[in-house]
Image (cartoon, rainbow, N blue to C red):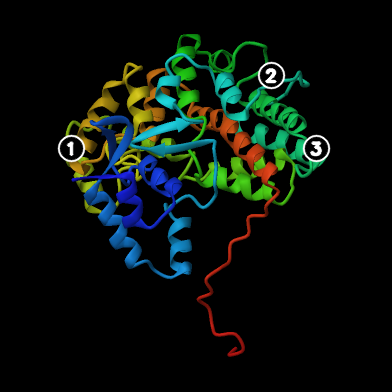
Amino acid sequence: MWLSATEALRRLNVKPQTLYANVSRGRIRAKADPADPRRRLYHHDDVDRLVRRAAGRPRADAVAAEAISWGDPVLPSAVSTVASGRLWYGGQDAVDLAETASLEDIAELLWGDFPGLPDIAPVTSSGITAAMSALVERAAADPPSTFRYPAALRADAAGVLADVAAALAGPGEDALHERLAHRLGRPRAADDLRRALVLLADHELNASTFAGRVAISTGAPLAAGALAALATLTGPLHGQAAAGVRGLVDDLSGDEAVTEALRDWLGEGRGVPGFGHRLYPHGDVRAAALLGAIAMPKAYARFREAAEGLTGEEANIDFALAALAAAYDLPAAAPIEIFALARSVGWLAHMLEQAQTGALIRPRARYVGPRPGET
């Protein structure tokens, strides 16, 4: 049932780092060798499954298409990953970090050095629109991200984060979660907001992060990359997903037969927002950590029980974020504002990383239109 590293490498015909990558992504189970704890053993069935998959490997264009849609990473990154059902920031478990860390601590971890937030002029408005406006102004004034020293880029990143924080968390010199709690008028929520910010700080190559990296790959300023990422976040399949959860829970909150109502919903061919995640087949660890810390409103507890029973899928971070907002009676826009503030740290970490590569992200299209020259 178990193979030595030499045997596994021979069967797979790959380099050692490829074997280790498959283990980190949960594709190959590994354990310590009882005869020598310094060595590892690899599960025979997992190795053979990958050998069979390699034998029937599709064409390069099909592989590329799969990679763009929930496939293997299309870019190398040391910022974060999901492996073995856990989220890791720079090799550290995000759920463990969320017990005590602040968003600023995560910036320090992911950026390599967090210079602190600079003083900026007071803002006259708040919210996502204000954050976008601030980024537009900064993007027009900041220098390109190419050929810059890392320290200078980190200073730019801190300025971008300061602008976003001013719009989403309000002014002040306190920790970002405390500023956010004050702006929302819910000081008691500060620690739960801190936890949410840490859990949402990054999630490898999600849609908004990828958009930001593409922008930076052209040499655009960090503010332009953050603007691209923030614009992408506002879609209903990404940062606005929690709003869909909240709307559906509110619609069904007065219905005693929540299970029947959800069964009808599913019968119309619609999925239940806020449940299941392809990267977490055994449940979204971020959601479990956040839901375990808050007093969930009764309507959300009933909805969760019904949805998990009908779908077999566990609540994800979108449901948890909606439940957090409901638990503290936060404004309707609060979930995406929390999300955007948190994810800004991860976006900037990825953009700092991308800027240092100096590489342009330029995929090819698989053309499916009329044959050239026929029209």
CA–CA distance in space, label 1 to label 3: 51 Å
Q: Position of residue 342 (x, y in %)?
A: 54, 28
- Residue 315 image position (x, y, % from top left): 30, 34
Secondary structure category for the residue under label 3? loop
**Mark sitting earlier along the chain (3/2):** 2
Residue 229 in view, yes or no? yes
Q: Nearer the viewer, mark 2 or mark 1?
A: 2
In the drawing, does residue 55 fall left or right of residue 306? right
Tell me the amino acid under the disc marked 2: Gly
Seen in the picture, residue 208 relative to 128 is either above or below; the reply is below
Q: What residue is disc 3 on?
A: 142
* Residue at 58 percent of width and 66 percent of height: 364
In this rendering, the count of numbered labels is 3
Q: Which quadrant: the C terminus? A: bottom right
Q: Which amino acid, mark 1?
A: Gly
Structural crowding at the residue carrying mark 3, measured as other residues with C-alpha within 10 Å and reported as few (<14), some (14–19) or many (≥20): some
Q: Which quadrant is the N terminus positioned in?
A: top left
Circles 3 and 2: CB atoms closer than 8 Å: no
